[in-house]
Amino acid sequence: MGETGLTAIWPVGKVGAVPKPLSLPFDPIARADELWRQRWGPVPSMAAITSIMRAHQILLAEVDAVVKPYGLTFARYEALVLLTFSKAGELPMSKIGERLMVHPTSVTNTVDRLVKSGLVAKRPNPNDGRGTLASITDKGREVVEAATRDLMAMDFGLGVYDTEECAEIFAMLRPLRVAAQDFEEA
């Protein structure tokens, strides 16, 4: 297909892999948008979603690289942060999945890896005979504090934006999350 093939115009890669700089002499998403318009007409949402997906790849790779020395992925880091936010430092596995907006299998995998690392402990939930509580350990608290310092130092990968622009990004994506029924708008 050459330079106009999807592999040249869509900057895709393995999720979680560190994206290599594309260093292309053109913007592949703008090129895809141009070719899309020529073939099917203007659809600004295609360029927007492609940009969001590429931004996701870039940001996930950057934050994963920062937390990797701590034996974490960003997903594991988020679980640790969630546990630090809870009053007792522990939550039912079902609540973790709900708050992190992930499937129960993903929660189990994430928490089990944190348990193996000594960052989280699991025990039966005394309030629910079938449930399990995940609790952050002292080592987990130390790791999350250090990783948080490092992530804040690199602005979670968003250092190219100022405070107002970050707030604008959050505000622009909020209606999408409301439409997906992530939460009820007050």
Image (cartoon, rainbow, N blue to C red):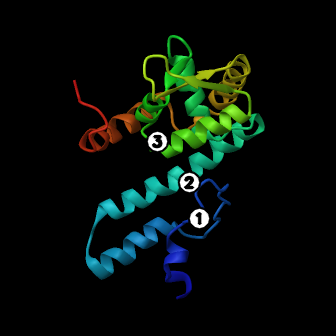
* Front-most of residues 134 and 131: 131
On screen, 95 above or below 10?
A: above
Q: Which residue is mark 3?
A: 104
Sequence-wise, the earlier of marks 3 and 1 is 1
Name the amino acid, label 1.
Answer: Gly
- Disc 2 designates what residue? 57
Amino acid type, residue under disc 3 in the picture: Pro
> Does the image show residue 113?
yes
Neighbourhood count class around disc 2 (C-alpha, 10 Å): few under 14, some 14–19, many 20 upward: many
The 10 Å Cα crowd at callout 3, few under 14, some 14 to 19, many 20 or more, is some
Query: What is the residue that sits farthest to the bottom in this orientation?
Result: 1
Q: Against 116, is 133 above or below? A: above
Front residue of 39 and 56? 56
Say whether disc 1 or disc 2 marks the residue closer to the N-terminus: 1
How far is disc 1 from disc 2 in space, using C-alphas?
8 Å
Q: Quadrant of residue 175?
A: top left
Above or below — where is 45 with respect to 146?
Answer: below
Front position among marks 3 and 1: 3
Q: Seen in the image, is 112 located left or right of residue 98?
A: right
Disc 3 versus disc 1: distance between alpha carbons? 26 Å
Give the SS element for disc 3.
Answer: helix
Q: Residue at x 75, y 34 (%)?
A: 70
Q: Position of residue 73 (x, y in %)?
A: 65, 41
Crowd class of label 1 (few under 14; some 14 to 19; many from 20; radius 10 Å) = few
Say whether residue 50 is left or right of residue 147.
left
Q: Amino acid at mark 2?
A: Gln
Query: What residue is disc 1 on?
Result: 13
- Point 58% across, 57% down: residue: 15
